[in-house]
Amino acid sequence: MDTPANTRTIVAHFIENIWNKNRFETLDDYLHPEFIDHSLPASFPANQQGLKQWILTTSAAFEHQTGIEEQATEGDTCLIKFTMQVRQIGVWRGIEPVGAEASVVGYRCFKVTDGKIREHWALLDGNSLENQLKNSTHGCKIQV
């Protein structure tokens, strides 16, 4: 039976094992067979494979670590406020990597059914991340 405590645990372990450790072999442990990810770019399928592709794409641009700042769970719904710490290692939004470090806040909402994540939505402040990377003091900058 899904309880708020179980839902909180599932979500916390999903963030740690999938986002932070890239343990994709455990995706089936966390994702419902009918999983839908409402947060992915249109070019990615809104399923388990699309989620994996998105995490790999993110990992190509950044070394990243996600920490849960706040977590609220009611029934089958879990909402988290998270902070993602990144170090840019690849091109992102046309910004060449210079090893810049940044921190960005976001929110994720999960629906859990039968002990697995069935749906996911996310909101991340990409503009803040972009501004931090563009204004980084790391590396060489052309003075105009």
Image (cartoon, helix red, strand yellow):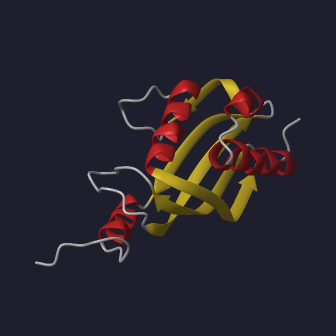
Horizontal and vertical percent for residue 82?
60, 62
Which residue is at the far left? 144
Which residue is at the far front? 140
Vertical comparison of 133 with 114: above or below: below
Which residue is at the far right? 1
Q: Of 76 and 7, which appears nearest the observer?
A: 7
Vertical comparison of 132 with 5: above or below: below
Residue 3 horizontal side relative to residue 48, left or right: right
Residue located at (61% from left, 58% from top): 65
Horizontal and vertical percent for residue 132?
37, 71
**How many labels were placed on the picture?**
0
Residue located at (80% from left, 34% from top): 115
- Snapshot quadrant of residue 64: bottom right
Q: Of 51 and 57, which appears nearest the observer?
A: 57
Quadrant in the picture for the N terminus: top right
Residue 118 horizontal side relative to residue 97, left or right: right
Horizontal and vertical percent for residue 73?
74, 54
Vertical comparison of 25 with 139: above or below: above
Q: Of 1 and 46, which appears nearest the observer?
A: 46
Residue located at (59% from left, 27% from top): 48
Residue 36 horizontal side relative to residue 12, left or right: left
Horizontal and vertical percent for residue 22?
65, 40
Residue 46 horizontal side relative to residue 131, left or right: right
Residue located at (10% from left, 78% from top): 144
